[in-house]
Image (cartoon, grey):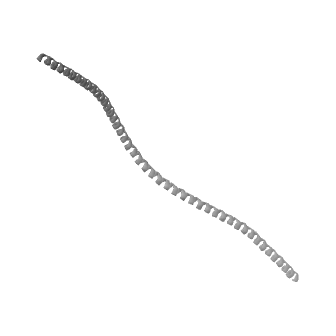
Amino acid sequence: MSFLTKNLNTNLLILLLFVGFGIAGITLFYMTNFQDINDQYSQKVEALNKTFNELTYTRNVINKTKEQLELKTLREEDLSEQYGELKEDEQKTAVERDQLKSTKASLEKKLLDTERFLVAEKHITADLEKENKELKDSVRNRRDENDRLQAEITRLRAQGCT
């Protein structure tokens, strides 16, 4: 039995060595697999954090763009309102301009008529002044003639009376 005990002890020792090596091998295998899984997990976490940061950045960009769009919309509404007011003012100004053009044309016609009338009146005045001068000359000539005739009558009376 001693052979069996010795053999059994050896077998048990070999079995224990196999079990120990097996456990060590399995531990190394799982440790390597765990390290690979842990590395993959770390990579996934880094990718997820990177994606989260990109998403946060994109969200900020979208929010800024949304604010700019809202501001642009408000500006557009304000400009549309101002454009409407300016268009209305332009239409009123166009009506006033047309009325002023009409008034100007009427006043220019009146001015032209008045200038023509004034020119005609100046001609009439010149003609009347010329006629007046001629009449004054005629009156003076008649007076001179009258004075000469009066002097001759006086001379003839003086001769006839004497």
- The residue lying at 59 percent from left, 62 percent from top is 56
Q: How many marks?
A: 0
The residue closer to the viewer here, 59 or 24, is: 59
- 115 horizontally vs 76: left or right: left
- 21 horizontally vs 131: left or right: right
- The residue lying at 21 percent from left, 21 percent from top is 142
The residue closer to the viewer here, 52 or 158, is: 158
Q: Is residue 133 above or below residue 94?
A: above
Which residue extends farthest left?
161
**Residue 153 occupies quadrant:** top left
Q: Is residue 134 above or below residue 71?
A: above
Position of the N terminus, as image quadrant, is bottom right
Which residue extends farthest front?
162
Which residue extends farthest right?
3
Rendering coords of residue 148 (x, y %): 20, 20
- 111 horizontally vs 28: left or right: left
Position of the C terminus, as image quadrant, is top left
Rendering coords of residue 146 (x, y %): 19, 21
- The residue lying at 52 percent from left, 56 percent from top is 68
Rendering coords of residue 87 (x, y %): 41, 45
**Residue 51 occupies quadrant:** bottom right
Rendering coords of residue 115 (x, y %): 32, 31
Q: Is residue 32 above or below residue 140?
A: below
The residue closer to the viewer here, 137 or 114, is: 137
- The residue lying at 40 percent from left, 48 percent from top is 85
Which residue extends farthest top?
160
